[in-house]
Amino acid sequence: MLVMAADWLTDGGNPQRTSWQKDEHILNKDNVKNLKIVWKLQLDNEPREMHSLFPPLIVGKIAIVAGSGDNVYAIDVATAKILWKKHFEFPTPAKRGHATDPLCPAGLTATPVISNGIVYALAGNGEIHSLKVADGEDVAPPFQFGYPYGKSYALNLWNDVLFTTTAQGCAGNPNQMWSVNLKDPTHKVMTYNPRSGGLWGRTGAAIDESGVAWAPTGDGRYDPATQTYGNGLVGAKVEGNQLKLQDYFIPKNWAWLQSRDLDMQVTPAIFKYKGRELMVAGSKECRVYLLDTKAAGGDDHQTPLDRTPLICNEEVNFASAGIWGGMASWEDAKGTRWVLTPFWGPVHSDFKVPVSYGPVTHGAVVAFKVEEKNGKFKLVPAWMSRDMDQAEPPAIANGVVYAFGSGENTEQAYPDRGLDDNSPERIHDSTHAVFYALDAENGRELYSSGDQIKSFVHFGGLSVANGHVYLGTFDSILYCFGLEP
Amino acid sequence: MSRKCTKSVLYGALFALNFAYAQYGRGGGDWLAEGADTQRSGWVKNDPHISVESVQGGVMQSLWKIKLNGSPTPAVVASRLITYKGFKDLLFVATSADNVVSIDYVLGKVFWESHLPYDSLLVPVKNGTANCPAGMTAGLSLAGPAATAVVRANVAPAPIPTLPRPKKIPAVVYALSSDGLIHTLNQHTGTDIGPAYRFIRGNAKARDLISVGNFVYAVTSDNCGGVSNGVWSINLEDTLVSEWKTGDASVLGLAFGADDMFATTSEGIAALDQKTLKVKQQESGAFGTSPLVFKFKNKEYVATGGAHGHILVRDAASLAIVVNIPADGSKMLGSALASWEDAESKTRWILTVRGSNVVAFKMVEENGSITLQQGWTSREMVSPAPPIVVNGVVFALSSGSRTAPAVLYALDGATGKELWNSGKSIATYSTTGISAGGSKVFVGTHDGTLYAFGYLLNRE
């Protein structure tokens, strides 16, 4: 009998986006070698461009899964039965991204968030729906929270304020941070625009203990005189009925990042360490930055607490290399604080890590320990995982790191055509995801799904709760890994 | 579903791109061919980092050097290319070894290198002479504009862009190999996008390769390899080659006006039809420089240097001489001129090497006629190469000699004041001259080393 002690209520596990499931007590590093697919469920979600199923949310016995075809499913995790399904109907919006553009799918793109038994889901037409977890019924009328087909990123929730971010200017949607107070009967939408490229951290904004929502900004200039904060990380907070910039961090080499499209586009992970609240973020350049949420980048906004050397992307490629998606962090029983980053492509020839597992050519997960000495903070490389085909953000639970290579073809440019990012070709050239369990202390592989997963993952992610690890794939199959019943 | 491109489709797409590319200009300080543009102005008009003030402030740095296989031609520069290996800022050089090399000019790393195999029944020349060097002699040309509209005069340059618009589709680089074939190479890969076409007989001494629309042009001199001296063009749509033979007269260079193209030879100057190469007008005289086309007060002019050191400015429409600056004693001019216009004062400057100096002249209109007033004269240099201009900064190269290495100088374009020099950074003498782009100046030396100086982008 499953003991439902753990939930996973938002993308990244919590508002801080650490992807650390603290309440997992079933799976551990001794038994995950026995993982199997305990069920898989074909959903009737229609993929849109390369998008399909977003990371499942877990509340008690129910998994809530959103799909790109403007669907939300509630699934009994014990029986793999669909409890209810909600399909959002709306008139076809006037604007949408051009067909075959993987950047701007026409449909639901934001992972929902759950609070107090209510699923908040952002439909493709930009309306927020408030659905009862128990039966999917609307508990309140939907309200507008963005542009139709505007490609919003994962929702986050803090003290009744809902956050999202937007990127790629899909359907004319501005690239900015969005918030709305659910208690406000007028549902006034509050935005903050850093005048940058898209805010396209995979799991949207991460929220610190002060309620500041942190999101990476895409390619653009840094010019504080004009409140322009491209290629950095911005933190904004609701004050009154406005979303206002609180702080920001811009790497000193932002112009280089801009010139080569190596933008910061990774949702940070926020955590406590020795009484301070820190966060880590990364970029396609392939470095990890350690920052203090109370003074990100210090007095000049450009000096992190620490910055790793280049981990990957020696080729300086904007497409199939670098850190993508999000970060992760957890603390072990000895009080060691760990930071995890995925990366794509070959490891940098100059990057040194004490423990590794063979050549890395397609991507891997790297673990760092956070250390402090005489007031100086450092990210110390600890281990690098085995090679993974486009390693995605990991999750951690009970001493086990869960990771996966998406199997996605991530090429956007071709020798004969230059830039030609198109879904049909990328879908055709994608393979399949492989799910791994690793020893969180040393990165040793404890389990691999091998060829069991049949499709790739794009904008999906892991969720862990109550002895199960969930992953949805492009073919709209939801996989549930666990132990023998 | 995988999409495949046939070569013909690709050619069409690339030509279409070249045309489209010309419609909004070449941002970001690209350097199209020898002399920078079709007018051979030697002028980078919009650069975000190089200015008199920034050079005085220390912006010029020695960035990198790369040893190449063979002596390099002047670099051509294309920035912000979205390649299958990421965004790249590339320069391209040909070398005497029939290689074409692409270098990421920010990183100072070779991006690709292609060897153009010798494909001719003629025996290749292995050991050249000073007059007829062996191997590839013509510099490269990027895909040029569809039409040859002359640089606007009396109009301030466009606002300096923070970053030029990225180029999403591979454009091409044209290369004339020593066997006389014209190659059309994908800028992203260095591979021929189609067959190479017979253009000029092998082993010629060719120069001034330049692409305009669907035509590629070059000139030949000194009857090297038994090749006729002349102006050559190839229409890449039908591979038809046209030629204007100049007999014993070596062709020194060519430049494009709004309607005609102009070629100087050792015996005269001619205005040619751009498509047929038919002579529309010609004037005799002993010339020593390639032509330079510019506009002043909304009229088009052609400036040339005489073989004996005088400077002539002609009305481009009639080839009538409107300015004749006599020689300064026995001082010879360099092989090319340069010209730029001060955005604020609207002063049009003409630059030339004269003897051991770079000399700057101002175009002045007095009582309805124009003349050249001497502005400033640089310090003495050893065999100075033709100067170039980036924004308002003149770069002059003391090419050096077997006993004196080359030195690059940055001069205030308005006063000639020396702002910076490369000191001892360059190890030996230069035979290839200079070009610029992407806030950098490139110098090749006789030993096959390419040097880069300029703005250092903080990558750390």
Image (tube, helix red, strand yellow):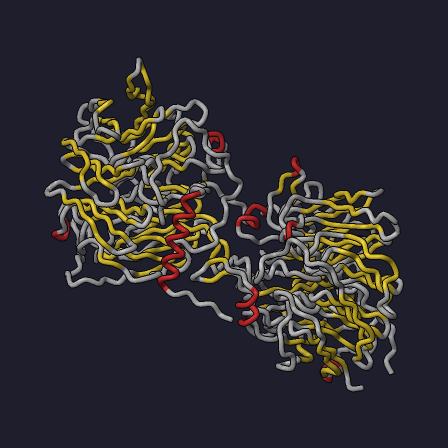
Quadrant for the N terminus of chain A, please: bottom right
The extreme bottom residue here reads A484
Left or right? Give the position of A99 relative to A81. left
Taking A371 as reference, is B457 above or below it?
A: above
Give how far across and how far down residue A316 sits, in percent: 52, 57
Taking A247 as reference, is B376 above or below it?
A: above
Residue B409 seen anywhere in this rendered image of the structure: no
- Residue depicted at x 37% and y 40%: B424
Query: Which residue is at the front of the view, A126 or A40?
Result: A126
Query: Which residue is at the front of the view, A212 or A303?
Result: A212
Give how far across and how far down residue B35 sits, in percent: 32, 40
- Residue depicted at x 64% and y 53%: A95
Left or right? Give the position of A321 relative to B143. right
Give how far across and how far down residue B66 sits, in percent: 38, 52
Give how far across and how far down residue B151 sits, in percent: 37, 34
Q: Quadrant of residue B231?
A: top left
